Image: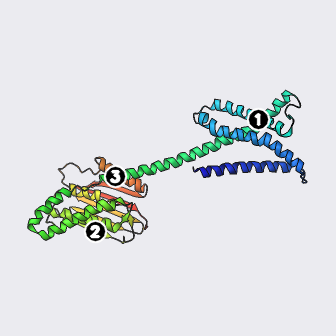
Amino acid sequence: MKKSAIIVIHAVYWFCFIMLLFFVYKLLVNTNISGVRALHFIRLSIGFAIIPGLIGFYISYTWLFNRFLQRKKILMLALLVGGVSYAATTIGGLSLRYMLGRNLLLNDGPIVAVMITLFMSVIPLVHSLFGLGMRGFITWYGDIKLKEELSKRNHETELALIRSQIDPHFLFNTLNNIDVLIELDAGKASKYLNMLSDIMRFMLYETKTEKIPVAKELEYIEKYIALQKIRTSNASYVTYTINGSYDEILIEPMLFIPFIENAFKHAENTHIENAILISFIFTDNMITFTCKNKYKKHTERQKVYSGIGNDLIKRRLQLLFNTKHTLNISDENETYITELAIEHSNN
Protein backbone atom coordinates (compact mmCIF):
# COMPACT_ATOMS: atom_id res chain seq x y z
CA MET A 1 0.00 0.00 0.00
CA LYS A 2 1.25 3.48 -0.85
CA LYS A 3 2.55 5.65 1.99
CA SER A 4 0.10 8.40 1.11
CA ALA A 5 -2.82 5.97 1.50
CA ILE A 6 -1.48 4.79 4.87
CA ILE A 7 -1.14 8.39 6.06
CA VAL A 8 -4.74 9.08 5.03
CA ILE A 9 -5.96 6.01 6.93
CA HIS A 10 -4.16 7.15 10.09
CA ALA A 11 -5.44 10.71 9.71
CA VAL A 12 -9.03 9.53 9.28
CA TYR A 13 -8.72 7.23 12.31
CA TRP A 14 -7.54 9.99 14.66
CA PHE A 15 -9.99 12.51 13.22
CA CYS A 16 -12.84 10.11 13.99
CA PHE A 17 -11.51 9.60 17.53
CA ILE A 18 -11.32 13.35 18.19
CA MET A 19 -14.85 13.77 16.83
CA LEU A 20 -15.96 11.03 19.24
CA LEU A 21 -14.42 12.93 22.16
CA PHE A 22 -16.19 16.08 21.03
CA PHE A 23 -19.48 14.19 20.85
CA VAL A 24 -18.96 12.85 24.39
CA TYR A 25 -18.23 16.35 25.60
CA LYS A 26 -21.44 17.64 24.07
CA LEU A 27 -23.39 14.92 25.90
CA LEU A 28 -21.79 15.64 29.27
CA VAL A 29 -22.18 19.40 29.43
CA ASN A 30 -25.02 21.83 28.99
CA THR A 31 -25.70 23.61 25.74
CA ASN A 32 -23.98 26.73 27.05
CA ILE A 33 -20.32 25.84 26.74
CA SER A 34 -17.93 28.10 28.58
CA GLY A 35 -14.35 28.55 27.44
CA VAL A 36 -12.94 27.47 30.82
CA ARG A 37 -14.97 24.27 30.88
CA ALA A 38 -14.02 23.44 27.28
CA LEU A 39 -10.32 24.01 28.01
CA HIS A 40 -10.54 21.80 31.08
CA PHE A 41 -12.16 19.01 29.05
CA ILE A 42 -9.51 19.32 26.32
CA ARG A 43 -6.76 18.91 28.93
CA LEU A 44 -8.49 15.89 30.45
CA SER A 45 -8.97 14.41 26.99
CA ILE A 46 -5.29 14.88 26.16
CA GLY A 47 -4.17 13.31 29.45
CA PHE A 48 -6.62 10.42 29.74
CA ALA A 49 -7.44 9.68 26.09
CA ILE A 50 -5.19 11.16 23.42
CA ILE A 51 -1.72 10.63 24.92
CA PRO A 52 -2.46 7.10 26.20
CA GLY A 53 -4.23 6.31 22.92
CA LEU A 54 -1.27 7.45 20.82
CA ILE A 55 1.17 5.48 22.95
CA GLY A 56 -0.91 2.31 22.94
CA PHE A 57 -1.75 2.51 19.25
CA TYR A 58 1.72 3.14 17.86
CA ILE A 59 3.64 0.80 20.16
CA SER A 60 1.26 -1.97 19.05
CA TYR A 61 1.36 -0.81 15.44
CA THR A 62 5.14 -0.53 15.12
CA TRP A 63 6.60 -2.98 17.63
CA LEU A 64 4.16 -5.50 19.08
CA PHE A 65 2.75 -6.53 15.69
CA ASN A 66 6.12 -7.36 14.17
CA ARG A 67 7.72 -8.92 17.23
CA PHE A 68 4.81 -10.91 18.63
CA LEU A 69 1.61 -11.05 16.56
CA GLN A 70 3.34 -12.05 13.30
CA ARG A 71 5.34 -14.64 15.21
CA LYS A 72 2.12 -15.88 16.85
CA LYS A 73 3.34 -15.27 20.40
CA ILE A 74 -0.20 -14.56 21.55
CA LEU A 75 0.24 -14.94 25.33
CA MET A 76 3.25 -12.63 25.42
CA LEU A 77 1.40 -10.21 23.16
CA ALA A 78 -1.60 -10.10 25.50
CA LEU A 79 0.61 -9.42 28.54
CA LEU A 80 2.52 -6.69 26.76
CA VAL A 81 -0.64 -5.02 25.44
CA GLY A 82 -1.98 -4.88 28.99
CA GLY A 83 1.31 -3.55 30.34
CA VAL A 84 1.62 -0.93 27.62
CA SER A 85 -1.97 0.20 28.21
CA TYR A 86 -1.39 0.65 31.94
CA ALA A 87 1.92 2.47 31.37
CA ALA A 88 0.34 4.71 28.74
CA THR A 89 -2.43 5.71 31.17
CA THR A 90 0.16 6.45 33.87
CA ILE A 91 2.08 8.67 31.45
CA GLY A 92 -1.17 10.42 30.57
CA GLY A 93 -1.87 11.03 34.26
CA LEU A 94 1.58 12.50 34.77
CA SER A 95 0.99 14.81 31.82
CA LEU A 96 -2.21 16.01 33.51
CA ARG A 97 -0.24 16.91 36.62
CA TYR A 98 1.96 19.10 34.46
CA MET A 99 -0.98 20.70 32.59
CA LEU A 100 -3.28 21.23 35.60
CA GLY A 101 -0.65 21.81 38.26
CA ARG A 102 -1.97 19.08 40.57
CA ASN A 103 -1.97 15.31 40.76
CA LEU A 104 -5.49 14.07 40.08
CA LEU A 105 -4.64 10.42 40.57
CA LEU A 106 -3.20 10.66 44.11
CA ASN A 107 -5.77 12.93 45.73
CA ASP A 108 -7.68 9.95 47.18
CA GLY A 109 -4.68 7.73 47.92
CA PRO A 110 -2.53 5.28 45.96
CA ILE A 111 -5.10 2.44 45.89
CA VAL A 112 -7.72 4.65 44.30
CA ALA A 113 -5.09 5.91 41.88
CA VAL A 114 -4.27 2.36 40.81
CA MET A 115 -7.96 1.56 40.34
CA ILE A 116 -8.57 4.71 38.31
CA THR A 117 -5.52 3.97 36.17
CA LEU A 118 -6.74 0.42 35.54
CA PHE A 119 -10.14 1.74 34.57
CA MET A 120 -8.71 4.39 32.25
CA SER A 121 -6.36 1.78 30.68
CA VAL A 122 -9.33 0.60 28.66
CA ILE A 123 -8.80 3.55 26.30
CA PRO A 124 -5.18 2.73 25.30
CA LEU A 125 -6.11 -0.97 25.31
CA VAL A 126 -8.75 -0.34 22.67
CA HIS A 127 -6.32 1.76 20.68
CA SER A 128 -3.71 -0.99 20.93
CA LEU A 129 -6.15 -3.48 19.47
CA PHE A 130 -7.03 -1.05 16.67
CA GLY A 131 -3.31 -0.51 16.02
CA LEU A 132 -2.76 -4.26 15.70
CA GLY A 133 -5.81 -4.57 13.48
CA MET A 134 -4.84 -1.68 11.22
CA ARG A 135 -1.27 -2.93 10.84
CA GLY A 136 -2.60 -6.41 10.11
CA PHE A 137 -4.94 -5.07 7.43
CA ILE A 138 -2.22 -2.98 5.78
CA THR A 139 0.19 -5.92 5.85
CA TRP A 140 -2.47 -8.29 4.46
CA TYR A 141 -3.37 -5.85 1.69
CA GLY A 142 0.30 -5.32 0.86
CA ASP A 143 0.85 -9.09 0.69
CA ILE A 144 -2.08 -9.46 -1.70
CA LYS A 145 -0.77 -6.73 -4.00
CA LEU A 146 2.73 -8.22 -3.87
CA LYS A 147 1.42 -11.69 -4.71
CA GLU A 148 -0.61 -10.25 -7.59
CA GLU A 149 2.46 -8.47 -8.94
CA LEU A 150 4.64 -11.56 -8.54
CA SER A 151 1.95 -13.70 -10.14
CA LYS A 152 1.67 -11.27 -13.06
CA ARG A 153 5.42 -11.24 -13.58
CA ASN A 154 5.54 -15.02 -13.28
CA HIS A 155 2.82 -15.34 -15.92
CA GLU A 156 4.67 -12.95 -18.21
CA THR A 157 7.86 -14.95 -17.73
CA GLU A 158 6.06 -18.22 -18.40
CA LEU A 159 4.43 -16.85 -21.53
CA ALA A 160 7.80 -15.62 -22.79
CA LEU A 161 9.24 -19.08 -22.14
CA ILE A 162 6.30 -20.68 -23.89
CA ARG A 163 6.74 -18.52 -26.97
CA SER A 164 10.42 -19.32 -27.08
CA GLN A 165 9.60 -23.04 -26.98
CA ILE A 166 7.19 -22.93 -29.92
CA ASP A 167 9.70 -23.00 -32.77
CA PRO A 168 8.92 -24.33 -36.27
CA HIS A 169 10.34 -27.85 -36.72
CA PHE A 170 10.05 -27.78 -40.46
CA LEU A 171 12.57 -25.03 -41.27
CA PHE A 172 15.51 -27.20 -42.22
CA ASN A 173 13.35 -29.60 -44.22
CA THR A 174 11.79 -26.66 -46.04
CA LEU A 175 15.19 -25.24 -46.90
CA ASN A 176 16.23 -28.62 -48.31
CA ASN A 177 13.02 -28.83 -50.36
CA ILE A 178 13.55 -25.32 -51.73
CA ASP A 179 17.13 -26.21 -52.57
CA VAL A 180 15.93 -29.15 -54.64
CA LEU A 181 13.18 -27.03 -56.22
CA ILE A 182 15.65 -24.38 -57.39
CA GLU A 183 16.89 -26.69 -60.14
CA LEU A 184 13.36 -27.64 -61.22
CA ASP A 185 11.52 -24.31 -60.99
CA ALA A 186 13.52 -21.31 -59.86
CA GLY A 187 10.48 -19.02 -59.87
CA LYS A 188 8.48 -21.30 -57.59
CA ALA A 189 11.52 -21.79 -55.35
CA SER A 190 11.84 -18.03 -55.00
CA LYS A 191 8.16 -17.79 -54.08
CA TYR A 192 8.54 -20.40 -51.34
CA LEU A 193 11.72 -18.77 -50.10
CA ASN A 194 9.82 -15.50 -49.69
CA MET A 195 7.13 -17.37 -47.76
CA LEU A 196 9.77 -18.81 -45.46
CA SER A 197 11.22 -15.33 -44.98
CA ASP A 198 7.75 -14.01 -44.07
CA ILE A 199 7.29 -16.81 -41.54
CA MET A 200 10.63 -16.06 -39.91
CA ARG A 201 9.78 -12.35 -39.81
CA PHE A 202 6.46 -13.17 -38.19
CA MET A 203 8.13 -15.27 -35.50
CA LEU A 204 10.83 -12.71 -34.79
CA TYR A 205 8.62 -9.62 -34.57
CA GLU A 206 4.89 -10.33 -34.43
CA THR A 207 5.11 -12.85 -31.58
CA LYS A 208 6.66 -10.24 -29.29
CA THR A 209 3.39 -8.35 -29.03
CA GLU A 210 0.67 -9.39 -26.63
CA LYS A 211 -2.04 -9.66 -29.29
CA ILE A 212 -2.19 -9.55 -33.07
CA PRO A 213 -5.01 -9.46 -35.64
CA VAL A 214 -6.36 -12.90 -36.48
CA ALA A 215 -5.67 -12.13 -40.15
CA LYS A 216 -1.91 -12.18 -39.50
CA GLU A 217 -2.14 -15.50 -37.66
CA LEU A 218 -4.12 -17.03 -40.51
CA GLU A 219 -1.68 -15.67 -43.07
CA TYR A 220 1.13 -17.34 -41.15
CA ILE A 221 -0.78 -20.64 -41.10
CA GLU A 222 -1.53 -20.48 -44.83
CA LYS A 223 2.13 -19.98 -45.67
CA TYR A 224 3.12 -22.75 -43.28
CA ILE A 225 0.71 -25.15 -45.00
CA ALA A 226 1.95 -24.09 -48.43
CA LEU A 227 5.55 -24.84 -47.44
CA GLN A 228 4.56 -28.20 -46.00
CA LYS A 229 2.85 -29.13 -49.27
CA ILE A 230 6.10 -28.76 -51.21
CA ARG A 231 6.94 -32.37 -50.39
CA THR A 232 3.84 -33.80 -52.07
CA SER A 233 2.09 -33.54 -55.41
CA ASN A 234 -1.21 -34.57 -53.82
CA ALA A 235 -3.46 -31.50 -54.11
CA SER A 236 -5.99 -33.06 -51.71
CA TYR A 237 -3.41 -33.80 -49.01
CA VAL A 238 -4.56 -30.83 -46.89
CA THR A 239 -8.02 -29.26 -46.63
CA TYR A 240 -8.03 -25.82 -45.06
CA THR A 241 -11.27 -23.87 -44.50
CA ILE A 242 -12.25 -20.62 -42.83
CA ASN A 243 -15.83 -19.63 -42.02
CA GLY A 244 -17.08 -16.41 -40.48
CA SER A 245 -15.81 -12.87 -40.17
CA TYR A 246 -12.60 -12.18 -38.26
CA ASP A 247 -11.62 -8.67 -39.38
CA GLU A 248 -11.67 -7.02 -35.95
CA ILE A 249 -10.64 -9.98 -33.80
CA LEU A 250 -7.35 -9.87 -31.88
CA ILE A 251 -5.70 -12.97 -30.43
CA GLU A 252 -2.43 -14.00 -28.82
CA PRO A 253 0.10 -15.08 -31.47
CA MET A 254 0.86 -18.71 -32.36
CA LEU A 255 -2.04 -20.32 -30.53
CA PHE A 256 -2.93 -22.86 -33.21
CA ILE A 257 0.30 -23.64 -35.04
CA PRO A 258 1.57 -26.21 -32.48
CA PHE A 259 -1.45 -28.42 -33.19
CA ILE A 260 -1.01 -27.99 -36.95
CA GLU A 261 2.68 -28.85 -36.64
CA ASN A 262 1.72 -31.98 -34.77
CA ALA A 263 -0.73 -32.98 -37.52
CA PHE A 264 1.90 -32.71 -40.24
CA LYS A 265 4.39 -34.58 -38.08
CA HIS A 266 2.16 -37.63 -37.74
CA ALA A 267 0.33 -37.62 -41.08
CA GLU A 268 3.23 -39.40 -42.73
CA ASN A 269 1.48 -40.69 -45.85
CA THR A 270 1.34 -37.70 -48.19
CA HIS A 271 -0.61 -39.62 -50.85
CA ILE A 272 -3.81 -39.97 -48.81
CA GLU A 273 -6.65 -37.61 -49.67
CA ASN A 274 -7.73 -35.32 -46.84
CA ALA A 275 -4.93 -36.62 -44.66
CA ILE A 276 -5.12 -33.32 -42.77
CA LEU A 277 -8.26 -31.25 -42.20
CA ILE A 278 -7.88 -27.79 -40.67
CA SER A 279 -10.83 -25.48 -40.08
CA PHE A 280 -11.64 -22.21 -38.35
CA ILE A 281 -15.13 -20.99 -37.49
CA PHE A 282 -15.49 -17.40 -36.27
CA THR A 283 -18.62 -16.16 -34.54
CA ASP A 284 -19.39 -13.02 -32.54
CA ASN A 285 -17.57 -14.17 -29.42
CA MET A 286 -16.05 -17.56 -30.22
CA ILE A 287 -13.20 -19.04 -32.26
CA THR A 288 -13.59 -22.75 -32.97
CA PHE A 289 -10.47 -24.46 -34.30
CA THR A 290 -10.46 -28.07 -35.48
CA CYS A 291 -7.47 -30.03 -36.70
CA LYS A 292 -7.72 -33.67 -37.84
CA ASN A 293 -5.01 -35.89 -39.20
CA LYS A 294 -4.95 -39.50 -40.30
CA TYR A 295 -2.06 -41.68 -39.18
CA LYS A 296 -0.85 -45.20 -39.77
CA LYS A 297 -2.28 -47.77 -37.40
CA HIS A 298 0.96 -49.67 -37.03
CA THR A 299 2.89 -46.58 -35.90
CA GLU A 300 3.22 -45.57 -32.29
CA ARG A 301 0.10 -43.84 -31.04
CA GLN A 302 0.23 -40.12 -31.55
CA LYS A 303 0.93 -38.12 -28.41
CA VAL A 304 0.35 -34.41 -28.75
CA TYR A 305 1.13 -33.72 -25.11
CA SER A 306 4.46 -35.42 -24.64
CA GLY A 307 7.51 -33.38 -23.69
CA ILE A 308 7.98 -29.94 -22.17
CA GLY A 309 6.83 -28.10 -25.28
CA ASN A 310 3.37 -29.65 -25.21
CA ASP A 311 3.01 -29.15 -21.47
CA LEU A 312 3.74 -25.51 -22.07
CA ILE A 313 1.01 -25.38 -24.72
CA LYS A 314 -1.57 -26.45 -22.16
CA ARG A 315 -0.08 -24.14 -19.58
CA ARG A 316 -0.21 -21.21 -21.99
CA LEU A 317 -3.88 -21.78 -22.78
CA GLN A 318 -4.64 -21.99 -19.07
CA LEU A 319 -2.75 -18.77 -18.30
CA LEU A 320 -4.30 -16.83 -21.15
CA PHE A 321 -7.90 -17.99 -21.05
CA ASN A 322 -8.48 -20.00 -17.86
CA THR A 323 -12.16 -21.05 -18.03
CA LYS A 324 -12.75 -19.20 -21.32
CA HIS A 325 -11.46 -22.04 -23.45
CA THR A 326 -12.04 -25.74 -23.99
CA LEU A 327 -9.54 -28.17 -25.49
CA ASN A 328 -10.64 -31.65 -26.53
CA ILE A 329 -8.28 -34.29 -27.91
CA SER A 330 -9.65 -37.56 -29.31
CA ASP A 331 -8.45 -40.54 -31.34
CA GLU A 332 -11.07 -42.14 -33.58
CA ASN A 333 -10.57 -44.67 -36.39
CA GLU A 334 -6.93 -43.80 -37.03
CA THR A 335 -7.76 -40.11 -37.01
CA TYR A 336 -6.40 -37.76 -34.40
CA ILE A 337 -8.74 -34.85 -33.63
CA THR A 338 -7.95 -31.61 -31.83
CA GLU A 339 -10.79 -29.20 -31.03
CA LEU A 340 -10.06 -25.86 -29.42
CA ALA A 341 -12.76 -23.29 -28.64
CA ILE A 342 -11.79 -19.85 -27.33
CA GLU A 343 -13.99 -16.97 -26.21
CA HIS A 344 -12.80 -13.67 -27.60
CA SER A 345 -13.67 -9.99 -27.67
CA ASN A 346 -13.29 -7.62 -30.59
CA ASN A 347 -10.79 -5.37 -28.85
How many other residues sit within 10 Å of disc 1, few (<14), some (14-19) or many (≥20)?
A: some
Q: How many marks?
A: 3
Amino acid tagged 1: Ile
| Distance from Cα at disc 3 to Cα at disc 1 | 63 Å
| Near-viewer residue (256 or 42) | 42
| Distance from Cα at disc 1 to Cα at disc 2 | 84 Å
Amino acid tagged 2: Thr
Q: Between disc 3 and disc 2, whose residue precedes?
A: 3
Asked if residue 295 is positioned above or below residue 62 in the image, the reply reads: below
| Distance from Cα at disc 3 to Cα at disc 2 | 27 Å
Element under disc 3:
helix
Q: Between disc 3 and disc 1, whose residue precedes?
A: 1
Horizontal placement of 250 versus 62: left or right? Answer: left
Horizontal placement of 283 versus 276: left or right? Answer: right
List x then y, in percent, for residue 143: 53, 45
Residue 239 in sight here = yes
| Near-viewer residue (134 or 331) | 134
Which residue corresponds to mark 2?
A: 241
List x then y, in percent, for residue 313: 33, 53
Element under disc 2:
strand
Which residue corresponds to mark 1?
A: 91
Q: Are marks 3 and 2 in contact (CB under 8 Å)?
A: no
List x then y, in percent, for residue 243: 33, 70
Which residue corresponds to mark 3?
A: 162
Residue 235 in sight here = no
Residue sitting at x 63%, y 39%:
62
